[in-house]
Image (spheres, helix red, strand yellow):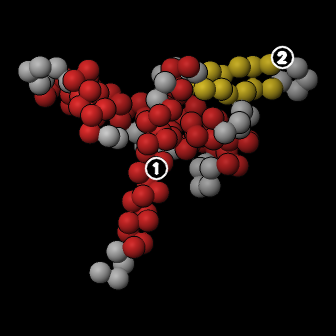
Amino acid sequence: MAEESRLKLAKEVLSDPRNQKEEVQALQDTLYVLGGKWKLPIINSICNGNRRFRDIERSIPGITTRMLSKELKEMTANQLIKRTVIDDTPVVVEYISTDYCESFGDIILEMIKWGKEHRSRLKGSKGE
């Protein structure tokens, strides 16, 4: 992020004078909703077009059925995804990201970018 836009964002987000307690609470809220090993990969999977439980499960190596079910329930409760039951034979359940979830799409892209740069940095410094 360019320094000018970082300063602008800081001015919009941070109070003056700074309120450390409020900032920590906001960070904790964010980590509560998005934290853990599976939430961001699940969001990424859904945003990549996987809408059905088994498709989401297959797209995320290592996730268990039980964990995916638990995380989808939490994410639905936090309004990040919407669960839709289509009354057909057989019944079809689909998950889609909400506008609320998509509101932090830029953050996820920045995290992916940072993660790629970090991995590349570590690979490049192995000989040092």
Whole-percent x and y of residue 49? 71, 36
Describe residue 103's horizontal placement relative to residue 45 as left or right.
left
Label 2 close to label 1 by CB (< 8 Å): no
| Residue marked by disc 1 | 113
| Label 1: which secondary element | helix
**Dot 2 surroundings within 10 Å: few (below 14), some, or many (20 or more)?**
few
Name which residue lies at 66% across and 22% down.
83
Residue at the outermost bottom position = 127
Whether residue 100 is visible here, answered yes or no, is yes
Percent coordinates x, y for residue 126 in the rendering? 36, 78
Q: In the rendered structure, which amino acid carries the disc numbered 2?
A: Asp
Quadrant assignment for the N terminus: top left
The residue wearing badge 2 is: 87
Residue shown at 73% from the left, 41% from the top: 54
In front of the other: label 2 or label 1? 1
Rendered residue at 83%/17% (across/down): 87
Where the C terminus falls, by quadrant? bottom left
Q: Is residue 55 left or right of residue 8?
A: right
